[in-house]
Amino acid sequence: MSLTIVRLYHDLLGTYGDQGNAEILVHRARARNLEVDLVEVTPGMAIPRSGDIYLLGGGEDGPQSAALEMIKVDGGLNYAAAGGATVLAICAGFQIIGESLPDSTGKTTSGLGLVDAHTAYDSSPRSVGELVIQPSRGGLPVLTGFENHQGLTRLGADMPPLGLVRSGIGNGFNNQEGVWHGNVFGSYMHGPVLARNPELADAVLQCAIGPMQAFEDPLAQAFAKERRITLGGITTSS
Ligand code: GLN
């Protein structure tokens, strides 16, 4: 079986190292003997419509607006997501996949509408620091990452968050962090989040390919555990 991972505009949406999420997925998929094709979409290129997993990262307001406009005009990401493709969108990317968000001038603009989420800027201080969350489902352990965003994101009443905040800010409403709706994941966690949380990487892969054999990666597991213990006083890997 082969897997196509599409990384969108990482020159625009890669300020915080989120492009590393693609490398983690490639590594963990190859460890399961999958053939993996990583497609790098740069401005001006058409977004493939038949990818299995689409990745969006964080970025500053200007590049975020530019990326959003290109993705809207292209239409390929919405097409793929409507067909069940898996999406992992971080920070600016998370805001982009919602219903509305501020553009680079601060004016509200429409997002891609993949999830019911509305982002706005208010006068609160920027949310910067380590973030620890307890996921709501999927058997996922406590997840860690770091956040750095001005926008706060309110989920619709029926939108499940990725988890609830144990420490940090996250979405800024109802103690929620991120979103996990069908095969679409959004989060404010940088890290890259999949490097810091291999279990989340496997949850993303599983959405695309179904059940997988276990994969022991001692370095990844040790890194995840160290962050969980240091940030949350959590003494087991879960
Ligand atoms: N520009 C957005 C905000 O500040 C996203 C920032 C980011 O991706 N880190 O809310």
Image (tube, rainbow, N blue to C red):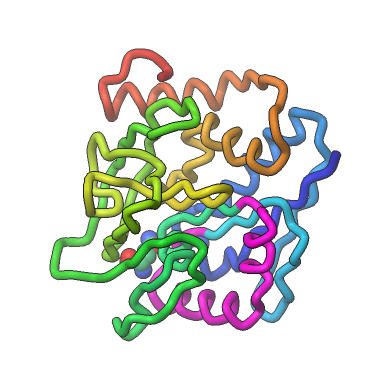
Expressed as whole percent of the image width and height from the top left, the position of residue 82 reads 64, 62
Query: Which residue: 55% across, 60% down?
Result: 56
User: In the image, 171: left or right of 25?
Assistant: left
Query: Which residue: 63% across, 56% down?
Result: 54
In which quarter of the view is residue 145 placed? Answer: top left
Report the span colored magenta.
57-86
Q: In front: 75, or 128?
A: 75
In which quarter of the view is residue 162 placed? Answer: top left
Expressed as whole percent of the image width and height from the top left, the position of residue 206 reads 65, 36
- Residue that sits furthest to the front in the current view: 158
Residue 232 higher or lower than 39, as above or below: above
User: In the image, 70: left or right of 222?
Assistant: right
Taking the image as four quarters, which one is ligand 1 found in? bottom left
Q: Count how many numbered circles sit on residues in the image.
A: 0
Magenta stretch encompasses residue 62: yes
Which corner quadrant holds the N terminus? Answer: top right
Expressed as whole percent of the image width and height from the top left, the position of residue 12 reads 53, 70
Q: In front: 138, or 101?
A: 138
Main SS category, magenta section = helix
Query: Which residue: 46% across, 28% down?
Result: 140
Query: Which residue: 75% across, 66% down?
Result: 48
Expressed as whole percent of the image width and height from the top left, the position of residue 209 reads 72, 39
Which corner quadrant holds the C terminus? Answer: top left
User: In the image, 161: left or right of 213?
Assistant: left
Magenta stretch encompasses residue 128: no
